Image: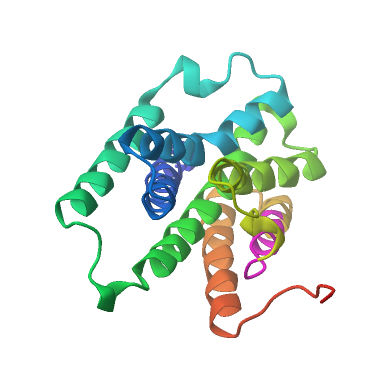
Amino acid sequence: MSISLLVIFDFIGTVAFAISGAITGIHKKMDIFGVNILAIMTACGGGLTRDIVMGNFPPQMFINPFYVIVAAIVANIVFFIMYYRKGMPAKFSGIYDKGLFISDTLGLAAFMVDGIMIGANFGYEDDLFLLVFLGFITGVGGGVLRDVLSNQMPAIFVKHVYALPVIIGGITMVIMHEFMHTWTIAMVSSFALVILLRVMARHFLWNLPKVEL
């Protein structure tokens, strides 16, 4: 059951982050090549970073390029929809922000689960700190690469407690597994928790404190 769920979360995360990367690339006026590269790096960058941390070489995205292909297909669908519509009408100008939030939220939640499960399947099930870190880096890694490549401050540092829900979700997931000895409930519950925290942060304008100069 956990393996089939993991495939579902993999697919959700890949599609969501590919949309996020494509939307950002279009918003930054990149050409179709740039949009594709940004979408692929956003969708696969977290997993790439996770594999490097675990010493899993070559990283899975190069051994099994299925999700790279999925990300490219999604990127081109988004690009051509926007291309033939000549952008979005003014009354839909907020779609970039909303689309980015929805896709980021789904991607963060799905890849947080994915990172923890990959670590557990690699034999690190008892190393709880490492599992939480792997969930964290898989969740936020692609978004950080997207922001760096598009020349903007990574959202992880400034926006709607971007990373904190992933950390809380990861901790919740490993603790639930420790007490319940089943990954299935822990996966679904922590996925839902990350989404809930992100939605609440956006609705109530929660942000971590920062120094105003």
Residue 7 against residue 170 in the figure, above or below: above
The residue at 65%/32% (across/down) is: 50
Residue 7 against residue 108 in the figure, above or below: above
The spot of residue 44 in percent (x, y) is: 50, 34
Residue 101 lies left or right of residue 53; in this view the side is left
The residue at 68%/54% (across/down) is: 170
The spot of residue 81 in percent (x, y) is: 19, 51
Any part of residue 126 in sight: yes
Quarter of the C terminus within the rendering: bottom right
The spot of residue 98 in percent (x, y) is: 41, 69
The residue at 55%/53% (across/down) is: 108
**Highlighted magenta segment, given as a residue range:** 159-170
185, 205: nearer the viewer: 205
Residue 168 shown in magenta: yes
State which quadrant residue 115 falls in.
top right
87, 129: nearer the viewer: 87
Residue 24 shown in magenta: no
Residue 94 lies left or right of residue 197; in this view the side is left
Quarter of the N terminus within the rendering: top left
Residue at the limit of the structure toward the left, as seen here: 84
State which quadrant residue 153 falls in.
bottom right
The spot of residue 137 in percent (x, y) is: 67, 43
State which quadrant residue 179 falls in.
bottom right
